[in-house]
Image (cartoon, rainbow, N blue to C red):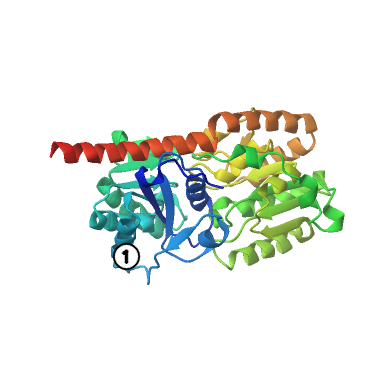
């Protein structure tokens, strides 16, 4: 539960604007910043009615867009900012940054863009990614400041022509204490009876193609040959309603349907993580700094992840987890099999991962750094006004 900062009326109000239709990493970061605010009053505003308002546990005001071309929503967001006495607008998605670039000017407040993933490599659809990358390059120069959630994203923005001096890196963070100490038996009792004592290999993600879930499923037959009772747990809601059906069809085609459990969205992630023997994140591309992996590390899980972008900033392969090439189900299966066969190795990796998560990826550090960045932008705006 969030604890408001002292002298709330005198504390700068920061409005976080995002899409809100889904509840993935972006939404979870915003919810965490709102719950753990200290030096600012953080409030969330959604452009689309969806999962953010239903499952985040954070009060989110809706300023609905009538459609993708509803430019008038910027006026309504600006009115909300003025009504809430907001002093800074922070946007977290490409759509919200487009709206926010106008709304911030209408409300006469500074605008910070937070980049959570590479817009030019977000979907794998070439034309869409090219369009999104071009739009991001057009919008970022208008922002008062840019926050990247990983050094990899900063470097990508610099390579696209954004001056490094305009970018601050604020690594994502998780509430490490809430991730650890879950009740493994509480989750295992939700599984089919014959699976409750089985080795569990699982992932937690917004179900979307770039998460590489097909590669985990394609690795499953080789894992099952070595560990026939192994059960695979896929936790998370879908980006598209039809995607889980495609994954289930792949399970049928591979002959592994009886060994895979799709749970949908769950709120008891600590219990899920406690029950897993191995956590897997087989992303293909587009990772900024994945919260699910940070949570698994904070819970002391041995993790196998793909060697992509922000993931390699999180996992030190061989010490805090194992990295394998993306799009390589055989390597993924080999790494998982090695860990399932070696309990002491799993424990060693999990302990090192927990320590690294607590040291580098705590929510207190993320909130402090993000709020410091926001306050610097406000101080710079005040200084410009004073010298004008």
Tell me which corner region of the image, top left, top right, bottom left or bottom right, holds residue 303: top right
User: x, y percentage for residue 316?
Assistant: 58, 30
Q: Is residue 117 visible?
A: yes
In the picture shown, does residue 217 fall above or below 76?
Answer: above
Which residue does the image show at 51% across and 61% down from the upper left? 53
User: x, y percentage for residue 34?
Assistant: 48, 48
**Residue that carries the numbered disc 1 in the rendered image:** 76
Q: Is residue 155 visible?
A: no
From this viewpoint, which residue is outermost toward the left?
388
In depth, the one of 295 and 308 nearer the eye is 295
User: x, y percentage for residue 76?
Assistant: 32, 65
In depth, the one of 242 and 223 nearer the eye is 242
Tell me which corner region of the image, top left, top right, bottom left or bottom right, holds residue 182: top right
Q: Quadrant of the C terminus?
A: top left
Badge 1 element: helix
In depth, the one of 347 and 363 nearer the eye is 363
């Amino acid at each position: 539960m969030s604890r408001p900062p002292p002298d709330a009326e005198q504390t700068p109000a920061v409005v976080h604007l995002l899409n809100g239709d889904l509840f993935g990493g972006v939404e979870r970061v915003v919810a965490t910043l709102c719950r753990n605010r200290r030096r600012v009053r953080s409030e969330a505003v959604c452009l689309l009615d969806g999962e953010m308002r239903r499952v985040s546990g954070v009060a989110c005001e809706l300023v609905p867009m009538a459609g993708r071309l509803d430019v008038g929503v910027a006026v309504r967001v600006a009115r909300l900012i003025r009504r809430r006495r907001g002093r800074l607008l922070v946007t977290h998605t490409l759509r919200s940054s487009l709206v926010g670039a106008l709304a911030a000017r209408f409300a006469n407040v500074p605008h910070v863009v937070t980049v959570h993933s590479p817009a030019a490599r977000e979907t794998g659809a070439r034309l869409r990614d090219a369009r999104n990358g071009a739009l991001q390059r057009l919008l970022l120069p208008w922002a008062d400041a840019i926050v990247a959630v990983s050094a990899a994203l900063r470097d990508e923005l610099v390579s696209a022509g954004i001056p490094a001096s305009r970018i601050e890196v604020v690594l994502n963070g998780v509430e490490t204490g809430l991730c650890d100490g879950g009740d493994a038996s509480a989750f295992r009792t939700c599984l089919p009876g014959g699976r409750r004592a089985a080795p569990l290999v699982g992932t937690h993600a917004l179900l979307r193609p770039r998460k590489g879930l097909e590669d985990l499923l394609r690795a499953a037959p080789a894992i099952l040959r070595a560990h026939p009772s192994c059960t695979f747990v896929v936790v998370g809601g879908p980006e598209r309603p039809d995607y889980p059906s495609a994954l289930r069809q792949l399970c049928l085609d591979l002959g592994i349907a009886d060994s895979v459990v799709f749970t949908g969205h769950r709120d008891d992630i600590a219990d899920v993580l406690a029950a897993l023997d191995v956590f897997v994140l087989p992303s293909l591309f587009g990772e900024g700094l994945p919260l699910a992996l940070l949570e698994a590390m904070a819970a002391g899980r041995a993790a196998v992840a793909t060697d992509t972008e922000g993931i390699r900033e999180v996992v030190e392969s061989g010490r805090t987890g194992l990295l394998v090439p993306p799009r390589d189900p055989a390597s993924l299966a080999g790494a998982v099999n090695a860990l399932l066969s070696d309990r002491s190795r799993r424990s060693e990796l999990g302990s090192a991962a927990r320590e690294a998560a607590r040291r580098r990826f705590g929510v207190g550090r993320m909130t402090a750094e993000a709020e410091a960045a926001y306050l610097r932008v406000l101080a710079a705006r005040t200084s410009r006004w004073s010298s004008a």
